[in-house]
């Protein structure tokens, strides 16, 4: 059968299609705006934590002179140790400290609690009660400052754990399955460009869309900004950098970036996804399958991962017939995950069935895809129909660009 590279190609000659595509793009923009708004509120929470920490530091500074005149060595040592921890936490409140440090956060939390308990016990001792009222007031004021700092440290720990979750929120906007319309890609890029400067998860999604649109230099520049920030998103940024470079055949640089991503965190789901995408484009089927299999167990990614796996299997079913059957199974499992399957799920099933040499069933699935597809998606279904009806091979392009970037 004649080979034909197939990806998503966009038409712009029909007014109805343009209107529909614009509506889809508007819906996508509103979803992005919601996450951006929540991220802005999230940054404001950090600002409040930092401001309150500064107030704690000010209290400690204001009471320092009176505190040094208190001649109780035990209380001096305990408060000095607690003050060192407070100052350490205040200094570390930046995005660059957000790494995989759950264990150290837990340890610091336990240590602070223990120190506060010991300090409280000391303040209740008979020796401290014998100090004059002014001295006791200074000690109590500093103790309350430490309590406030301890609470703020806990708030900061919670903040740092939530921050990486925004990557999960932005990931769907990066078009991981590469089936956005051209209008959606353009609209998403424009909206993501309006993200907060420190919104590095949004930058990653934007860089991935830049690759889709063929704006490679801009995408690489974005990944370099993220890498310079030294956050927990480093592995994903390296992987994003890799696919950008790979898409313009800078193979050596792309491989170096990918290896840095894998070395940093090879089990990170989005690193696996991008690794699988690159491997599939290189027709390294075993590597691509291995990575995607790991993603199927990640619930938020299961639907896309099964469809991705189905396309990978279908892509080399011509040489191994059993792969066509596996492709159909994965596509059907993906279809069953949705109460109302989308056009894309039916499309993937049709391609899988065609690879398994059951063209009649493939055309039936394709008809269902066409019935649920929007005008901007229908063009792709019709191009696949033409290949099927002519008995030609479908070679899926795992790195397809928008039509404005690469002409079909």
Image (spheres, grey):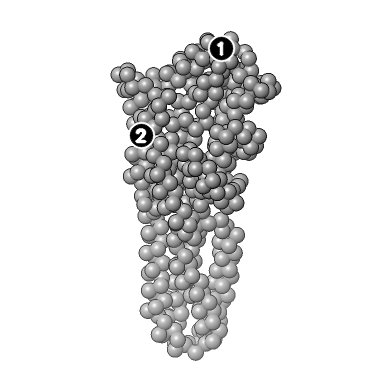
| Mark count | 2
Residue annotated with mark 1? 391
Task: Answer with left or right where residue 381 lies relative to residue 329.
Answer: left
* Pointers 2 and 1 in contact (C-beta within 8 Å): no
Residue annotated with mark 2? 186
Which label sits in the foreground, 2 or 1?
A: 1
The CA span between labels 2 and 1 is 34 Å
Q: Is residue 123 among the parts visible in the rendering?
A: no
Q: Residue at x 56, y 30 (%)?
A: 308
Q: Residue at x 39, y 39 (%)?
A: 215
Quadrant where the C terminus lies? top left
Q: Which mark is residue 4?
A: none
Q: Residue at x 57, y 75 (%)?
A: 118
- Crowd around label 2: few <14 · some 14–19 · many ≥20 (10 Å): some
Name the quadrant containing residue 63.
bottom left
**Element class at badge 1:** loop
Q: Residue at x 53, y 10 (%)?
A: 390
Q: Position of residue 130 (x, y in %)?
A: 50, 87
Quadrant where the N terminus lies? top right
Question: In the figure, 370 relative to 116: above or below?
Answer: above
Task: Answer with left or right where residue 195 lies relative to residue 279.
Answer: left
Name the quadrant containing residue 281.
top right
Q: Position of residue 346 (x, y in %)?
A: 53, 20
Q: Position of residue 237 (x, y in %)?
A: 49, 48
**Which of the pair 136/366 is nearer the observer?**
366
* Mark 2 or 1, nearer chain start: 2
- Crowd around label 1: few <14 · some 14–19 · many ≥20 (10 Å): few
**Element class at badge 2:** helix
**Which of the pair 365/186 is nearer the observer?**
186
């Amino acid at each position: 059968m004649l080979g034909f590279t197939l990806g998503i190609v966009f038409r712009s000659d029909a007014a109805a299609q343009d209107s529909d595509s614009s509506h889809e793009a508007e819906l996508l923009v509103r979803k992005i705006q919601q996450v951006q708004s929540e991220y802005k509120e999230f940054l404001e929470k950090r600002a409040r934590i930092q401001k309150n920490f500064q107030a704690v530091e000010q209290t400690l500074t204001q009471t320092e002179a009176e505190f040094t005149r208190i001649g109780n060595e035990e209380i001096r040592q305990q408060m000095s140790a607690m003050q060192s921890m407070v100052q350490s936490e205040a200094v570390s409140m930046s995005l660059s400290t957000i790494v995989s440090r759950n264990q150290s956060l837990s340890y610091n939390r336990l240590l602070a609690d223990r120190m506060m308990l010991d300090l409280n016990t000391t303040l209740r001792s008979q020796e401290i009660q014998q100090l004059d009222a002014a001295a006791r007031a200074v000690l109590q004021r500093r103790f309350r400052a430490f309590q406030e700092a301890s609470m703020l440290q806990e708030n900061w720990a919670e903040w740092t754990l939530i921050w990486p979750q925004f990557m999960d929120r932005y990931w769907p906007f990066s078009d991981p399955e590469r089936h956005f319309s051209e209008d959606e890609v353009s609209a998403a890029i424009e909206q993501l460009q309006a993200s907060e400067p420190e919104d590095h998860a949004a930058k990653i999604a934007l860089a991935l869309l830049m690759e889709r649109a063929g704006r490679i230099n801009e995408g690489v520049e974005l990944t370099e900004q993220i890498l310079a920030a030294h956050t927990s998103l480093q592995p994903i940024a390296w992987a994003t950098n890799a696919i950008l470079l790979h898409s313009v055949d800078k193979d050596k640089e792309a491989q170096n970036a990918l290896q840095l991503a894998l070395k940093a965190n090879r089990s990170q789901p989005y690193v696996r996804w991008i690794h699988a995408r690159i491997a599939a484009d290189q027709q390294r089927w075993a590597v691509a399958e291995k990575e995607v299999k790991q993603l199927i167990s990640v619930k938020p990614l299961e639907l896309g991962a099964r469809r991705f796996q189905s396309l990978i299997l279908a892509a080399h079913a011509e040489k191994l017939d059993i792969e066509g059957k596996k492709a159909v199974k994965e596509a059907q499992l993906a279809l069953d995950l949705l109460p109302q399957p989308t056009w894309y799920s039916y499309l993937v099933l049709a391609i899988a069935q065609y690879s398994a040499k059951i063209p009649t069933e493939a055309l039936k699935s394709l008809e269902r895809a066409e019935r649920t597809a929007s005008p901007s998606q229908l063009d792709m279904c019709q191009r696949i129909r033409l290949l099927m009806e002519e008995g030609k091979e479908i070679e899926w392009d795992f790195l397809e660009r928008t039509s404005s970037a690469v002409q079909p």
